Structures are given as C-alpha cells and as structure tokens.
Amino acid sequence: MKNIMIVQALSVAAATYVIKFFGMSFANLQLRPILIGPIIGLILGDFTQGIIIGTSLGAVFLGGFGVGGSLPSDTDMGAIVGTSFAILAGNDVKSAVALAVPVGLLSIFVYNLIKIVWHNAVVAIADNAVAQHNDKRYEHIHYAAIIFFGIPYAIISFTTIMIGVEPISQLMNSLPEVVNNFLSIASKLLPAMGFGMLLKSLWDKDLVPYFFSGFALAAYFGLDTMGIALVGTILAVLYGYNFLQKQTQDKKIAEATTSSRTYLVEAEDPDDDFFN
C-alpha cells in the first residue's frame, strides 16, 4: 500500500511539473482545471471522476484570470491537489472544491516567493550577462528559469499527497452533517459565482438577449448544459456567418460607391473638356 502511494505521489508530482513547465513555456500555455482534472484522474486510475471534478473546478475558477503580474488564484495547483485528494480519499466533488479553493489561494504565496527569490538571486546575473553581451550565458539563465519553475510545485504535490491524504480523509469523514451540507451547497454555489465573474468581465448590452434565452431554455424547456451549449454554438455560427456576409456586402457597396464617385468626377471635369 505504501509503495502504491509513493508511485501515485510521484506520478502526480511529475504531472505537476509538466503542467507548470507548460505554464512557463510555449507562450505561457496554461492548462485549465477542465484539462487538469482528467489528467490527474487518468494517473490515479479514475478518469471519469477526474472529468467530473475537473469540469466542476473549471466552473469555479472560470472568472479568475491574471492581469499583468497579478494572479487571483493558482488554478493549476488548486485543481491538482483538489482532484488528487478527492480521488485518493474516495470523496466527491464537494470535497474537491473545498480543498481546491484554499489551496489555489495559498499557492499564490509560493508563486510570489519563487518570483522574489528568483529575481533577487538571478536577475543581477542576467543583467551582467546582457551588459557583457554574453548571449549564451543569458540563454542558459532563461532556460534554467523555465526548468526550475515547476520543481517547487512538484515537491509540494508529492509531499502533500504522501502526508495529507489520510488526515484529510479522516477530517472530511468526521465533519458534522451541518458542515457537509454547507460544503455541498458551496460546491454548487461556487461554479455559479465563477460564471458570474466571467459574465461581469464580458458583459455587454448586446449579450442581454442571449443571456435570457439561455435562462429560458434551462428554466422553462428543461435543457441541460450540453443542450444549451449546442444551441449557443449554432447561434454563434449563424451570427459569425451573417457578420462575414455583412462585411462582404459593405465592402462591395464601398467599392461601388468609390468607383461611381471617381467616374462622376472624371466625367464632370471641365478642364478635360476644355483641353479636348
């Protein structure tokens, strides 16, 4: 049993490193919880539960995104730890959400600590390499930063899984019924808050009809999320097609108008008649 736990912890740590590596390379390609959940589920032998948890956590963190160098929450670590603990402890989505949110917030401190240590220790060396026009040395520092960034997170994932699964499992099982009910409600409320945060950042008066159309499809026609998503996709395709058609027509009208004005100017030019 101990050997299996070590293998699982090492596998999750390796996945954590790869996820963070992609976050620092390839144009900051960040994997969202909807992808991280299935990856962790596949590693831990419960792919279906990984999809379910990843989708739920994706909705929770949907409205959280970084602005400049400021990050509201580390969605990667929240999804990794939350999914891992829920699957290994045999708990459901509510426990994953209950763990993912605080872990995501706490992991930001690790992110800031790495930035502070790395900047203080290495930036001076990088500046010196630039001042000496030593491109190779600067390139090595750049790649070292990418390689190093995921190591602390991998260590954290390994340590928390090795040490924390059993205590967390006992804690979740010993919680009073009132607390369990609260976590169950929160696990359903937080995804709605995530959608609300995203909607607030994207809100526009032109979106009002689509918003209430989606509400009507869910409330009065009983469509589930997949059905509403399909309807939304069809409407988006039709909207895009009509928009492109309108652009093409406007371009043709503009070209025809310009052509007509040019012809009229040439036809009414008195200098041409005088010299001819």
Image (cartoon, rainbow, N blue to C red):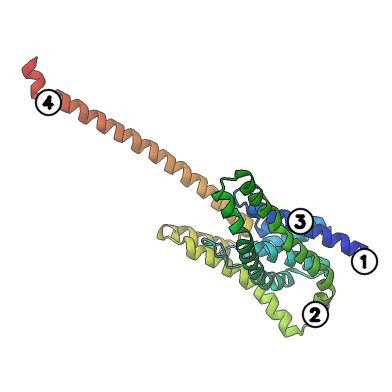
Mark 2 or mark 3, which has the lower sequence index? 3
- Residue at image mark 3: 15
Q: Amino acid at mark 2?
A: Leu
**Quarter of the figure that contains the N terminus:** bottom right
Q: CA distance from mark 4 to mark 1?
A: 94 Å
N-terminal of the pair, mark 4 or mark 2, is 2
Q: Are marks 3 and 4 in contact (CB under 8 Å)?
A: no
Q: Position of residue 83 (x, y in %)?
A: 75, 64
Give residue 243's quadrant in the image.
top left
Query: Do the CB atoms of the residues marked 3 and 1 lie less than 8 Å apart?
Result: no
Q: Amino acid at mark 1?
A: Lys
| Residue placed under numbered mark 4 in the picture | 268
Quick one: SS at disc 1? helix
Residue type, mark 3 in image = Ala
Identify the image quadrant of residue 166. bottom right
In this picture, residue 3 sits left or right of residue 236: right
**144 or 26: nearer the viewer:** 144
* Location of mark 1 (residue): 2
Residue marked by disc 2: 171
